[in-house]
Image (cartoon, grey):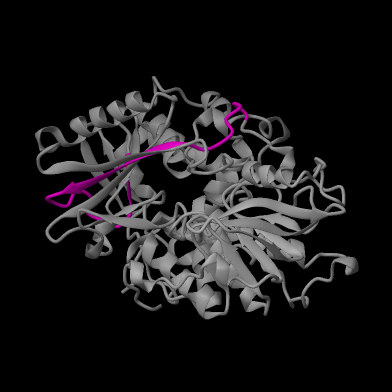
Amino acid sequence: MTSVNPATEDARGPSRASQLEPEYDVIVIGAGLGGLLAAAQFLRRGQRVAVIERLAHPGGRFTAKTFQGAQVSTGAVHMLPFGANGELAAMLRALGVPHAIHDSEVFASFHVRGRQIVTRSILQLASVLGPRQFAQFVRLGYDMLLRDPRPDERAQTYRDWLDQRITRERSPELYAYFERVCHFALSVDLDDVLYPEIVESTKNMFRYGAPGIVEGGCAALTGELERRVTSGGGALALETETLAILSEDGVARGVMIRDKRAGAETILRANLVISDIGPTATRRLVAADGANVPAEAADGAPGAWDEPVAPSGRRVASGLKTHLLADYSVIPHRGIMYCLDTDRIAGIVQPSNSDRRLAPPGKHLLITHQLMRSDDVNAEREAARADLRYLFGDDFGARVRILTMSQYRDEWPVNRKPQGSDVSPRTGLAGLYLVGDAVKPSGYLMVEGVAQSVNALLDTLDGWDASDQPPAQPAAPATPPKPSKLRAFYWLLAPPPPHPGSAGK
């Protein structure tokens, strides 16, 4: 573990588009978390890499900007879902990227019946749910964690499965527990995700460990990744727009780019193009070159253009986040406070508990998250304000005040594909592959899924046939085995211990 500081603007070392070489081994479109991780992995393999980013900063939805002395995130809540034990932390260790993660020391806390209850373990949920609902929780937990979904359950939505077993009227706190965890962790409603995906996600949450806050916030981690890419010989061109993905005879051969400041257009050549901008935007760039892309990959495998959607028809995972500054500590731990008695807000984190530099001196930073249930942004924001007035009473607007409210949807969603409807790294164009939050393997949440999408990409490339000339074959797959199922038993008393290579002091 290495301590890191919040990223600053003068720490960045990007290239200008005019400074790029005409040819690379790999071109990465998008300098979000997935794009930076992919670039670092290819540099580790000895490839010549260029990363193209249309914005003036890298990181996408996993960075932050300083506003009124606070680190206001562009999407993430400065948190890794599986903390120091997760796949993102493991990849950072493998790449030698300095980082520190402060794992939660509790299971969670719950705002219920007008007050907050802290639970260190699963057993302490009885104080939140009461004896009858806790007994129901144990029975449902057995079904979810200790047996595989039956054939008749595999096509059920999470709501259908849950409604067959409990009701909101008779078990309000328990129903709200399952609903709010789904809203906070996946940014989808119970109708938007199939039950088997919930099973895989829940198993991973218990097997890996507690969530953790990144020291310095997500901008610090993005800054370290950027430095790893540029110091490793990679080129990073900011404020550079990709106009088209170029292809010849059904094979990706490079990109056409435009320097947004100078206006100059340039062609870059590469035999491998990686896109971190989602399947829809990627397909538009392919079509911009006039290519007719088949629905399947060249080898007949399902590809990105299949565009699966959630069971409800939802195409992206959307949400609304509110950043607040508080004069006092609201949450007495480093984890999540789930809100079981609010109308919209699913959960709140207080990342300044892990790193006081994320908030101004004498203040605490709070970040709320809620599912967007409609396209009416004003109504969603007013619903958030109503919940905040309920949670904080007379302190709201005085000792607890809103910094920013941001919605994540359409072209800037929480996830470009809802959990469980992700696509393959393969596309319909040979030599063009995807990474990012639309390519999450089953059971992996948010940035953990982004890291695993890069592992999945590397494993896909290492399976190329001889005509594609893959790099040297590694001794083992990039995707690591999951932790032992026995780790889940830690939660009966306390969270699993953090990985010493990533844990913050």
Residue drawn at the location 20% of the way across and 37% of the way down:
115
Residue drawn at the location 58% of the way across and 74% of the way down:
234
Measuring from the top left, give residue 118's x and y in whole percent.
27, 48
Check if residue 337 falls in the magenta segment: yes
Quarter assignment of residue 56:
bottom left
Q: In the displayed structure, would residue 308 be above or below residue 476? A: above
Q: Is residue 412 left or right of residue 102?
A: right
The residue stretch that appears in magenta: 311-338
Quarter assignment of residue 312:
top right
Measuring from the top left, give residue 30's x and y in whole percent.
56, 56
Count of marks placed on residues? 0
Measuring from the top left, give residue 63's x and y in whole percent.
40, 57
Q: Nearer the viewer, residue 243 or 235?
A: 243
Residue with the most extreme top position? 169
Q: Nearer the viewer, residue 347 or 241?
A: 241
Check if residue 401 falls in the magenta segment: no
Which quarter shows the C terminus? bottom left
Q: In the displayed structure, would residue 444 be above or below residue 315? A: below
User: Can residue 114 be seen?
Assistant: no
Residue drawn at the location 52% of the way across and 50% of the way down:
445
